[in-house]
Image: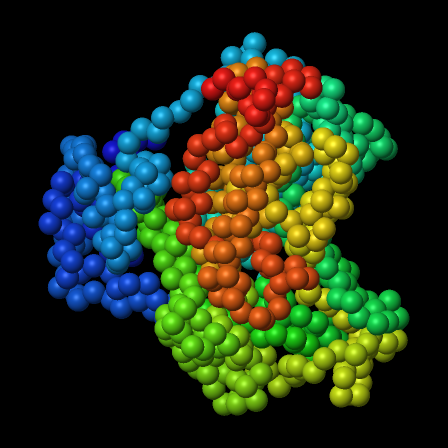
Amino acid sequence: MSELSRAVNATDEEIASALKHAHLPSLINVLVHLTGDSTLLDKSIKPAPMTIGGTPPGYPEELENRIHDLALQTLIHGRDHGFEDHPVDETLLLDMINFIAGVELTDEYIPYALDELNIAPKPEEPPLEPAVTRNFHVAIIGGGMSGLLAGIRMQELGVDFTIFEKNADVGGTWYENRYPGCRVDSPNHVYSYSFKPKDWPQHFSDRNALLGYFQETADEYGLRAHTRFETEVRELRFNVGTSTWEIEVEGPNGVETTVANAVIAATGQLNRPKMPDLEGIEDFKGPWFHSAEWDHTVPLAGKRVGIIGTGASAFQFTPEVVKEAADVKVFMRTPPWVATNPVYHEYITDETHWLLNQVPYYQSWFRFHMFWTSGEGLLSFARCDDSWNDNIQSVSPANQKLREILTRGIETHLKGRPDLIEKLTPWYPPAAKRMLIDNGHYYRALKQDHVRVVDDQIECINETGLRTSTGEQFDFDVIIYGTGFSASKILFPMRIYGRDGTELREMWNEDPRAYLGVTMPNYPNFFCLYGPNTNIVVNGSIIFFSECEMHYVSKCLRHMLKHGYTAMDCKPNPFESYNEKIDESSLKMAWGASEVNAWYKNANGRVTQNWPGSLVEFWHQMRELNPDDYEFTLRAEKVVGTAGLEPATT
């Protein structure tokens, strides 16, 4: 839909009321579009540079009133007479980007903004001709956020596909995780597909709203008809003679084998629960379960409950358990850093929904504001400064400032409990581990009289509970494990055999790597979404990454099919060079420089999960395919594009 075709359906009074809920910098950029007046981008009223853990400074009442009055008159005129088109050139667009970000950015953000903001029509490539795609089939593994996206992109490409989903419905992590308190920790206006906005009920919506969103997506795009539910992929083998993948699946009809020309693995990194390596874990006589496999038949009211873990999931379900249980012990290995966001559990107002839906360009600029404040703008706080002497507690002056802000938040929320302040203040730099978002809900739960935080090491689990390294015994009725996922075992437990018969996990050897996070040498026509080094610590939404990755995968398949190739295989040199750059860049970030243990790292301390650059850098690197990075098979066993062989035509 064209932005200027949005219908403003409201009275003057309703418009005026809604404008009081507007994010002012987003509204000012809207007015530049609708009035053509670039002088509104007054540097004296530019938003303050990005900060974390507090409420951004407001604007003088006189200024707010002036902007609201101008917006009111502009929207009334647009409602009654239609909106005028005031083109925005690239110079002005960069000024608008800089204005809403509060800092001076480079022109590398212009192409991203043009693509994201719906300012100009997006160039769309038509589907491939049926003669080109005939008999070509793509297997998509996983029906979660990335798998559904892959299916949509295959439809746009005109390629036949099947989604293999091990669960009974779509939704991925939002289908599987049903623990109380489960919700997203990225703002929903960026944790959503760029092409499918939604009237989210909350700023950070709960599990049911998110599951519903992905179920709606599957229905809207007819993806269920392409999906085999309750069917798990067990093994994949590449057939060199036919340039196809032979796929062993297990489903309602037992074990069977199917064939696909290409595979898109959309299983994610966080879909296999990880239990701690504790002696006697099976000895406990009461109910016990992992949070990702929550047993809702187990009553918690009036019970003694032991919670092992303080990561992202435990952070959300612990307050809910505290409400019911008579006694709660929380066993913590490493405390997380927590950024305060006052709207974390808040509902979005009707007025805000109206602004997003009916005011031209408002949704686009508000989303860019979220892109910056919840993602791109945070990266500078995590970047190391070589001249900074203290990399134990912080890695740069900006990181130290962030540490001070977050520490003040801990002290505020835990006022009156110096024992908890000491235990829950991390010793490591902010952003060395995943930083959590909250509005004080978690800390208030830990302050309850029937809750105790234990930071002694667990020695063993036994029949009645557990014993710590100090010799103290804790008895429970129920034990809940919030101990995360086997993130380093990407694509586990599938067995994937490449061109030469090598199994992928054997090749990786607990050190997963991929070119651009997507492809690996020796595994032709195999593409990862949410693969190695495409995860996030402080910056961004994982949906952003999946959309970038699928843009690249679509480019790969389009190129391969248009040129009559049957296979494309990543060359070793770009693969190695890319991963060397990833490793160098990771050491310049808090999560790579700090010695704190985190699931981002493998046993050797290498960061295998996270993207170390900016979001716009990732966006740019995924825009176009460089055919020189791949060897192409023109027909069975004839490889083109390598030294000494026939060069590939492009």
Above or below 542: residue 83: above
> Can I make out residue 148 in this image?
no
Please indicate whether residue 464 sits to the left or right of residue 393 in the image: right
Q: Which corner quadrant of the image does residue 641 belong to?
A: top right
Please indicate whether residue 164 sits to the left or right of residue 26 in the image: right
Above or below 164: residue 340: below
Residue ranking furthest to the front: 644
Please indicate whether residue 401 sits to the left or right of residue 127 in the image: left
The image shows residue 597 at horizontal and vertical percentages of 62, 68
Q: Which corner quadrant of the image does residue 384 belong to?
A: bottom left
The image shows residue 494 at horizontal and vertical percentages of 75, 42
Above or below 504: residue 393: below
The image shows residue 277 at horizontal and vertical percentages of 78, 67
Q: Quadrant of the N terminus?
A: top left
The image shows residue 485 at horizontal and vertical percentages of 68, 57
Above or below 244: residue 580: below
Q: Which corner quadrant of the image does residue 65 belong to?
A: bottom left
**Residue at the spot 27% in from the left edge and 44% down from the top edge:** 107
Q: Which residue is at the front of the view, 597 or 140?
A: 597
**Residue at the spot 76% in from the left edge and 84% down from the top edge:** 469
> Can I make out residue 376 in this image?
yes
**Residue at the spot 19% in from the left edge and 37% down from the top edge:** 89
**Residue at the spot 35% in from the left edge and 66% down from the top edge:** 51
Q: Which residue is at the front of the view, 247 or 328?
A: 247
Q: Which residue is at the front of the view, 344 or 265?
A: 265
